[in-house]
Amino acid sequence: MDHCVEEGGIELRNSNLPPFNQLKGRKIFNYELIEEIGNGKVGVVYKAYNKDINHYRAVKIIPKKKLRQNWQIEFIKVAKLEGIAQVAQYHDHKPHDNEPYEMFDGESFACILWEYINGDNLRDFIRKKPKAMTLEVILNITDQLLQAFRAMKEEGISHNDLHEGNILIYFDKRMSNPEIPRIKITDFGIGGSHDELKPKDDYRELARILHNLLELIDPSDLSDGKALFLYDKFLEFIRKKLLERNPTVGTFVQNPQELIDILSKIPNEYNSIAVIKSNKLSHPFDYLRCEQIGNSFELLQLLYSQNFPGYDDLLRRNNTILTGPRGCGKTTIFRNLSLKTQLLAGNKRGVSGNFIGIYYHSYDLYFAFPYLKSLKDDERRAIIHYFNLSILYEILDLLFIASDSEKFGNMISDNEVKEFQFHIKKYFNTYTYPPQGSNILRNLMSFIIGEKKALRDWFDRKKGAIKPDFISLDFIKEMTSYLQKNLRLFKDKPIYYLLDDYSLPTVSQQLQETLNDFILFPSEGSEHFFKISTESIVTFYPFNSKNKMMIENREYVVVDLGDYFLKEDYSIIENFISEVINNRLKNSEKIDTKYHDIRLILGANPYESYNELARQVRNEKPRGKKRRVLYYGWPTVVDLCSGDIANILELIKKMFEMVGPDNFSDPNGVKIPLSYREDDTLKATHLQDKAIREAGNEFLQKIGAIPEDQYGPKLKKIVEAFGRIAHWYLLNKNSKNLEGNPPHQAFRIEMQKAPELDDVSKKIYENLIKYGIFLRDIRGKSQRGNVVDRLYLRRILVPTFKLTPNKRDSIRLEESEFLLLLNKPEICKDMPTLKKQATKAKFLLDDKQMRITDE
C-alpha cells in the first residue's frame, strides 16, 4: 500500500484512518503489530510479529466505513496466484464465517494477513538508490513482472492499478544470485475497497513504470556500444511491444509469454549485429517490422526503398500527416529520412540532400504526460516547453554524431559548437559551461535531460520541485533559423521534424490540441515543416486548444500510403514490393542467387484475368470435390497488398517455411515457381494458396481479438457480413455494360450519402478505419450530388471470402443499410436480406419518429 501524497509532495494522511502507529502493540491473528509501514486511501499496513514461531507478516487494516461492495476481491484474486513468486501471498482475513470484525477503540476494522516483504516499494527504492537501476537490473525486473503477468493471464486476472507503490523490491540472501533484486506485486484491490477508481491497463502501466526507470540512465553516458544498443532496443520494446494494443499487429500483443521470449533475446541480438554490418542477413525475413531493428542503422538503410508510392508527395515543403495501415512502413520511412540514421549507416549523401530530417518518437510525450484531463494555461505551456526540450535534444544528438571528425571530417567545426552553446545559454540561465576539454554537446545533452526531468517533477507536483522558466513558444522557429544561418550543415536547407506515432489515444487529445497550437502553422522567418505519422486519419486530432479546426490542404496535407496503393499503377506498386523483398533475398547469407527474384519464385497467376477467376469462383464445386479455386502467383500477391508491407513479408515468409527455408541455400533445393511439395503426389495442397488463405484467416481472427471496448468481436462480424454480401454479388450479379457480362466483383463500399452516425456507430466506423480493416478513400465519389467516403476491404481478406482483387465494381449501400451493417451484422446474410432488414428498420424508425412528432 502506497503512501498518500498531496499537491506539493507533502504526505497527506486520510482523516478516516487511525493516527500513525496508534495500533502498535495490538494483536491480530496471534501477531503483534510492531510498526506502521504504509498507509493509503482506505487503510494502513503494519508489520506484525508472532514470537511463538519467530515469524513476520504484514497486516492491512481497513476501517469498516471505508469498505466497498466486493472488498474481498483483492485476496480472492491473489488466492488464485498462490505460489507465484512475484506476487505477495495472502494468508488470512477477517471478518469471515464466524470471525467478526476486529474492534479497536469501539470501531470496526477489516484485517487481511499478508506475506511480509523486507524491502521498499519501487518508488522509495529508486528515491534512495537511483544509481542502482542499471540496464541489467531493469531488464531483470521486467522479466519478473512479465512472469507475474503470465500467471495472471492464466487465471484471467488483471491488477488494474499497477504503479511504483504497488511493486515491492527486496533481496533474498538465500538465492544463488542474492545481488539481483526481487519483486512482489501487491494491492490487487481496485475492484473492491476503492472501486470508484477507473481500472488502468496493466501493460500500459508497466510500460510507463519501465520507461521511468530507463530515464534514470543518461544514454549519453553509455559509451559502450553494447550498452547503448541494449538501451535503444529496450526502449523500442517498451514503445512497440508493451504499449501495443492492436492484436492485428502480432500475437505478442498483451501476451506475456511471447513478450518474455522477445525480452530474453535482446541481449543476444547485439552479437548478430556483426552479421548485419557485413551487409548480410542471417534470414531474409528477420526484422519484418522496423521497430524490431532498433538502432541498427546499416540494416535500416539496407532494407529501405525510396520507391514507395507517395515518396515525392511526402517530401514536398508542407506540413504533412503520414498515415496508412499498420505494417506499411511509416516508422521505417521516417527513420530513414532522418540525417542521424543516414550518418550512422555510413551514408553521407544525406548531408548533400535538399533537406535535413530530425526524428522524434511521440510516445516520449505519453510517458511524460500519461493522464491528462482539463489543462490550465501553465500546464499547456509546460507541455510545449517539454516538447521544445525534446526537439532540442534530438538536434544536439544529431550534432554530436555529425561532429565525429574521424568518420565525417569537418562537418561541424569546434567553433560552430562553441557558438551554438553560447546561443543556447541565452535560453537557459541555469546552464553551466563544462570544464575545458569536455565534450560540449554531451554536456548540453545531459543538461537537457535534467531540464526535462525537472519539468516533469514540477508538473507532477513533486516535493521541492520548482516551476521552470518556460522558453519561448517560438523556440523551434528561432532555433531552426539559427541553425540555417550559422551552421554549414543546415545552410539553405529546410528542416523536416519527423514526429512518429502521433496517434490517439496514446498521444492524447489534450497533448495533440496543445501542440497543434503551433506545429501546424506556417513558419515565417525559418523554413521548417512537421511531418507527422499517425496510425490512421482518425487517430489524428485536427483541433487546437482553442477548438479551432486544422484545415486539410491549408495547415497540412495528408499522405495516406494505403490510398496510394489503391490508386497507383500496378507497375509502380509491383516494382516497389519486389524491390523490398528482393533486397532481403539478395542480402541474406543462406539464399542462393537462383532465388533472388520473388517474381520467379512465385510465378504467374493461374488465370488470365480476374474475370476468369470470378467465373472459377462461380463454378467452384463444394468442398471435397475436385474443382477448387486457387489463389497464387506473384501478381495475385501484389494485388493483395493494401500498403501493409509487413503483412506481405509475413505471407512470403510463410511460403518459404512451408518449403523449408534451408532448401533455398541449394540451387537445386526448391522447384520454382512454388506449387506443391514433392511428397504431395496427389497435389492436394498448393503451397501458395494455403499460405494466402491462412494469412487472411489469421488476420480475421486477430480482428476478433481486438478488445471488446474497441468492439473487436463486432468488427469481425461486420467484416464477415460484408464478405458474405460481396460473395453473393459475385455469384448472382454481373457487371453492367461490359462485354461478356463478367461477374460483379467488388470489395469496395460506396455509400449513397454520408451517413449520420450516433456515438456508438461512429466509434465502430472509426475503428474499422483505425485498425485498417477497411481503407478509406478520402476523395470518395459523387453520389446524388455529394462526395462521400468509399471504403475498401483490406485486400489480404479477399481470398477469405472468395472474392477477387478487381477494383472495378462497388457495393452501393443506402444509409439505413450501412447503419444496419454496422450495428446488426449478424443478420446480414446476403444483399437481399440486408435490403429487407434495412427497409424494415427504416420503417420502424420513421414510425417512431412520426409518433414523437404527433405527440
Image (spheres, rainbow, N blue to C red):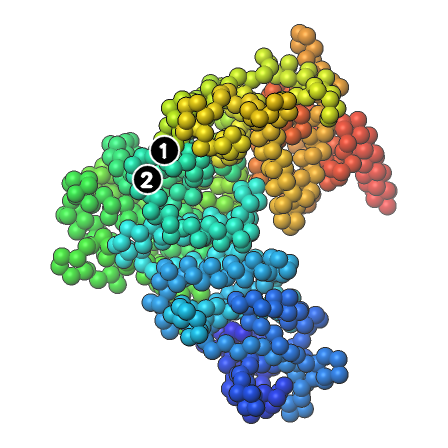
**Where is residue 306 drawn, in percent x and y?**
38, 29
Q: Residue at x 51, y 65 (%)?
A: 163
Q: Residue at x 60, y 29 (%)?
A: 690
- What amino acid is found at the position of numbered circle 1 in the picture? Glu
Q: Which residue is mark 2?
A: 275
In depth, the one of 247 and 433 nearer the eye is 247
Question: Label 1 neighbourhood size at 10 Å, few (<14), some (14-19), many (20+)?
Answer: some
Q: Which mark is residue 589?
A: 1
Q: Is residue 464 visible?
A: no
Query: Depth check: 43 or 151 in front?
Result: 151
- Helix, strand or loop under label 2: helix
- Say left or right for 742 vs 555: right
Where residue 545 appears, as percent x and y from the top left, is 49, 50
Please tell me which residue lies in front, 576 or 540. Answer: 576
Image quadrant in which the N terminus is located: bottom right
Query: Which residue is found at the position 54% from the left and 90% from the top?
Result: 51
- Tell me where residue 800 sits by quadrant: top right
Q: Measured along the vertical axis of the image, is residue 439 above or below residue 550?
A: below
The amino acid marked with disc number 2 is Val
Left or right side of 739 for 264: left
